[in-house]
Amino acid sequence: MIKVTNINGVAYYLNCELIETIETIPDTLISLRDGKKHYVKETPDEVVEKIIQYKKRIFVD
């Protein structure tokens, strides 16, 4: 799970394993495999970095 912030400023956790695409139009839009869409304040690069950090934490030996 990664912490993201919606456009209204409310932070929540999103299951990054369900992310299908991340777009900028002009806000960041995260589309999930189940068809749900989330607009967030973070840039796509920030979202990707959060995913990388999450994966590093769970796959540490």
Image (tube, rainbow, N blue to C red):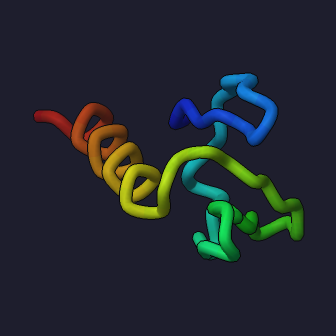
Q: List x then y, in percent, for residue 34.
A: 85, 66
Residue at point 69% right, 26% down? 12
Q: Residue furthest front?
A: 26
Q: Quadrant of residue 10?
A: top right
Please identify the quadrant where the C terminus is shown: top left
Q: List x then y, in percent, for residue 55.
A: 32, 45
Residue at point 56% right, 50% down? 16
Answer with left or right where residue 48 lies relative to residue 41: left
Q: List x then y, in percent, for residue 29.
A: 70, 64
Q: Quadrant of residue 56?
A: top left
Answer with left or right where residue 3 lies relative to residue 60: right
Q: Is residue 15 above or below residue 31?
A: above
Residue at point 87% right, 61% down? 36
Q: Is residue 47 above or below residue 26?
A: above
Residue at point 75% right, 54% down? 39
Q: Residue furthest right?
A: 35
Q: How many marks?
A: 0
Q: List x then y, in percent, for residue 19.
A: 63, 63
Q: Quadrant of residue 22?
A: bottom right
Q: Residue furthest left?
A: 61
Answer with left or right where residue 24 lies relative to residue 38: left
Please identify the quadrant where the N terminus is shown: top right
